Structures are given as C-alpha cells and as structure tokens.
Amino acid sequence: MSDVDPITLEVVRNGLSATADEMALIIMRSAYSPVVRDIMDYSTGLCDADGAIIAQGLTLPIQLCSFPRVMRFVQERFGDDLAEGDIFITNDPYGSGGQHLPDVYVLKPVFANGTLCGFATTVAHHTDVGGIVPGSVAIYATEIQQEGLRIPLAKLYERGRPNAVLFDMIRCNTRQPVEVLGDLRAQIAACLTGEKGLLSLIERYGADTFSRYVDALHDHAEVVMRETIAELPDGVYVAHDFLDGLGETPDPIRISATVTITGDTIAIDFAGTSDQVAASINCPISLPESAAFAAIRCLAHRDIPNCGGYLRPITVTAPEGCLLNPRYPAACGARGVVGYRVFDAIMQALAQVVPERAMAGCEGGPFLMAGGGEWQGRQFVLNEMLVGTWGARFDRDGIEGISNPAANISNQPIELIEAEMPVEILSYGFVPDSGGPGRNRGGLAFVREFRFLQDIRFNLRGDRRDHPPFGIDGGRPGAPSAHILVDRDGAETALPAMPMQGFTAKAGEVFRLVGAGGGGFGDPLSRDPERVLADVREDKVTIHGAERDYRVVIDPRTLSVDEGATAALREGAVA
C-alpha cells in the first residue's frame, strides 16, 4: 500500500505486540492457580473488528488459531448485540470453537467512539472445571459430558454488569472455586488492559488510519509467508507418526499429514488419520490447525508479524470424525498430546524437502499427571504438565530444559508443589544417554519423582514409549518414556502411557515420570569426537554410551578421547 509508512507500520505492530505481552504478564502476576501462574498454560491476543488475530502474547503458539474460530461464533451470534462493557466466556469445543473444557476463553469487544474496533482475547487452562476426576482430564472419559462444565458462548458481563448466575454456576461446578474464579478475574483484568492498549493506539493514529495499518500488517505478513513458501520445491510430502495407543494392550493410533506445496501456498491434509476414539484424546480441529501453522512458521528465516495475514497461504483440512476433527460428543480433555504429535508429523514431512529447516522428534508434548483430594482442611488439585526436550536440528543439538516448540509453558517449581500439596519431589533432572544419537544429538529426557504423603488418586497422560521421537537424515530416535509406580517396599510397576483408568497411590509410594529424549539429526558416526567428549564431561552421555552410539572411545581415568581406538572402531563400523 503506497500510503503506508513502513516506520509507522513497525511502530503499530510493536504497539500491538507490547499490549498482548502486557496482557500475558497481567495474567501471570495475578492468577491464583499453579497451572496458570507457574506452568503458564494460557494465551493472550488482540483481534481486529473482523475477528482476525493481529497480535499474540509470548505464550502458546498451539492456541493461536483458536481465537479466530471463537471470534467467528461471537460475530455470528452476537454481531448485532455487541455493546461497550460486554465480556464473553466459553469453553465449548462443540459449537463455540473451543479446544477442551479446561481451556476457558474470556473475550472483550473494544469500542472507540461507539464503533467496534477490535477485541481483547484470552484463554487459560483452569485447574478444575468438574467432571469425573480432579483436574478434569481423564484419559478414560468417553464423552464430553463426563469431563466437566460445558459453557456455551455467553456474556459473562453485559454492558458492564456481571452475570451473577453464570459466576455462581462456575463456582458450584469446580473443586477449586477460589483458584478458578481468581484466574477468571485475572483474564478479565488482562482484557481490560488489552482494551486500554488498543484504544491508546487508535487515539494516537485515528480509527481510519489505525484500520489501514492493521490491513497493511496482514498484507505484509502474507507477503513474507508466501515468499518463504515459494522458496520450497513444489511437491507432495507425506509423513506418519503414531501415538502409542490406549490402555494396557494399546493399538497404535495414526497421525497422517500430507503437505502439498504449490507455488506460494501450502495445503496440509490429515486424511488417513485414525478415527476418533472412545477416550479423551480426541482433538478438536482448532488445535491441529494451530499446530500446523506453528510448524510452517518455523520454516521462515525472516520475522513474520504474528497476525492473521500469514495464515492466508496455508490451508488445513481433516476428515470429520477422525481423531483431529471429532464429532460430538467425543471426549477431548486430554487432546493436547495429539496436537503436539501433529507438529512432529508435519516436521517429518518437511524434512523430506528442507531437512535443514526441520526438527527431529520432540518429547511428544507435555506429560500430564493430575490428582487431587483433601489436604490440611481444603481440596487440592495437582496438575503436573512436564515438558523439556527438543529434537536436534541441522546445525545444532536438541535443547533440553525448555518447552516444546509448539508451546511456551513451564514446569512447576518444586518448592511451591511441596508447600501447597501432600507431595514431595525426590528427584528432578536429566537422563544420560537419552538424547537420540546423531551428528547433532537430540535433547535429553527429564526424570521427576513424586512421593505421596497421603493416599491419592491420580491420572496420567503420556506417550512416546512404543514410538519414540524420530531422527532425521540418519539420526537415531530418542529414548522412550516411562511411567513407574514404586511401592513402599521398592517394587516397581510400569504403568501404561495412556491408561484407561486412574491409579490410587498409598502414602509413601513414589511415582517416577521419565520423559522421552529428542531425536537425533545426521549420522552419529559423523559427530566430532570432541563434542562427544564434552557430553561425557557434562554427564549427558556415559562413557559406555559414547562407545556404543558414537564409536568414540574415552579413557575413564583422563576423560580424554583415545583417537587411535576411536578411528579403528569407526572404520570397523563403516566397513
């Protein structure tokens, strides 16, 4: 657009981003529950008057596309009934655009001089919204009615007046009313902050000029994304990844991704994915869409505005009734593991065409342990969502101790868990030799051990045991995950990765959660022996693992590479 000043465009863009980030900080600093305050399982954003995203806070990419879907329902149902002071709420995946019941959306239309100019939007994972288990996430739920309170799109505030009945209904349907209502008010505060920031920009530039620059922002993002896609060879690239399956005798569950590159467009089709299942891992379409957009965005070496324009060259489809687009009333409380697997499947497909931009398999998304009961006279809910490992890339090792690339969440501080719940953390660290061997090594798996101080009923969601994170270009898979219950006599029982039941642990028993290691990139025998030695010195690789996986012989007394023995061993392996 010839009448758009590029410097002003950048100022507007950064003003929007700063407002979305400020909204995220408001939630983090004022939320009550650990899952929002410490794990940071929430997102913030701003939308234009049409409901297209124009900025998102530094939170979860995997939630990005859910805002526009929810906004479409807002406009369809309330387009002629939006007023200053309205605030909307929903969590319904069927009919309101939500992802699962714990993710509650709070949205505020923003008016300037009586004219709708945008929306301030938030979504947060609430610690408990009722249902058959504490935490509202049970693998063994078979329909959404078992998973908690289903909130249709409704006005939480109307023209500034709170809907007292709706607040009371939420309070009566949670095991954690203080935390849930506190987190809701944190979301409301964030929306008010987003409104203030949006109005400040409109006041500075005027409504018409601001709208013109928002349109230019969308157009610029689209141009950059199309240029990124045009650099890729045309073709059809197919990849499959698998969830381990459900229960004690699991059957693999397929995720199929067909990536078609044509000129400056990409189409992603999930035909061939397994059908929806009688468990809670069904994944409403907004999450696979978001995971797909996040994966494609990772291809870009240029900065792309975080707005709806960059989505225009990308289409995502999934057959109705499959795992990635389930029909009502399929349960979906534990759907997150599927969304992260979508990211991995698309990365496998992209590795066929641009391996230098792809990433080997990650840990598979957050490992979830949820339990609850009564402690010190009040109800508690433990929501552990543990993340921490990336796969290797063309030019670097996988990262450990960091959130999955499709998310931006954190592990809970041990001190806060122990201070507020009947749980003691015995160990928390990395597992040597767990990163997939390669020219670049996959990130290490984590291990965390929980000792229960009273009897507790808990639920699990994990994966990557039978199908560990994949390697790329000759890189080997990462180590598989494990769930182990240790009784008071020290006897160990391996628990299913996605069990179709809950578990009761006795006081004094220990649960050991071991994540999966990231996949490797490139032939392990091409890894510089000095890099292997550095890993040994940092306890990331054992001396035995160095010899077994990399054919590098290390003297245990001097911790130095035996160059002659290493050369002979590698030559023998190649021969």
Image (spheres, rainbow, N blue to C red):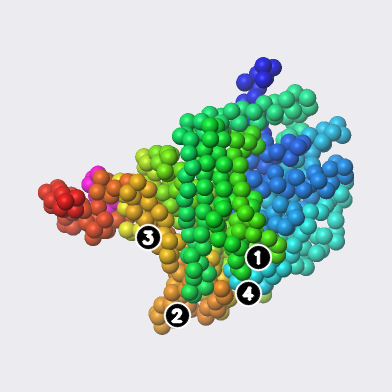
Q: Between residues 396 and 157, which one lies in front from this camera angle? A: 396
Q: Residue furthest bottom?
A: 489
Q: Position of residue 175 (x, y in %)?
A: 70, 69
Specify the amino acid type for callout 1: Ala
N-term-proximal mark, 4 vs 1:
1
N-term-proximal mark, 3 vs 2:
3
* Span highlighted in magenta in the image: 528-536
Q: Residue at x 43, y 67 (%)?
A: 482
Mark 1 and mark 3 in contact (Cβ < 8 Å)?
no
Provide the secondary structure element on which disc 2 rests: loop
**CA gap, disc 2 to disc 4?**
20 Å
Residue underneath mark 1: 331
Magenta span includes 531:
yes
Against 127, residue 213 (above or below) is above
* Circle 3 crowding by C-alpha within 10 Å: few under 14, some 14–19, many from 20: many
N-term-proximal mark, 3 vs 4:
4
Specify the amino acid type for callout 4: Gly
Mark 4 and mark 3 in contact (Cβ < 8 Å)?
no
As drawn, the label of residue 487 is 2
As drawn, the label of residue 479 is 3
Q: Between residues 540 and 355, which one lies in front from this camera angle? A: 355
Nearer to us of marks 3 and 4 is: 3
Q: Position of residue 392 (x, y in %)?
A: 39, 47
As drawn, the label of residue 373 is 4
Magenta span includes 230:
no
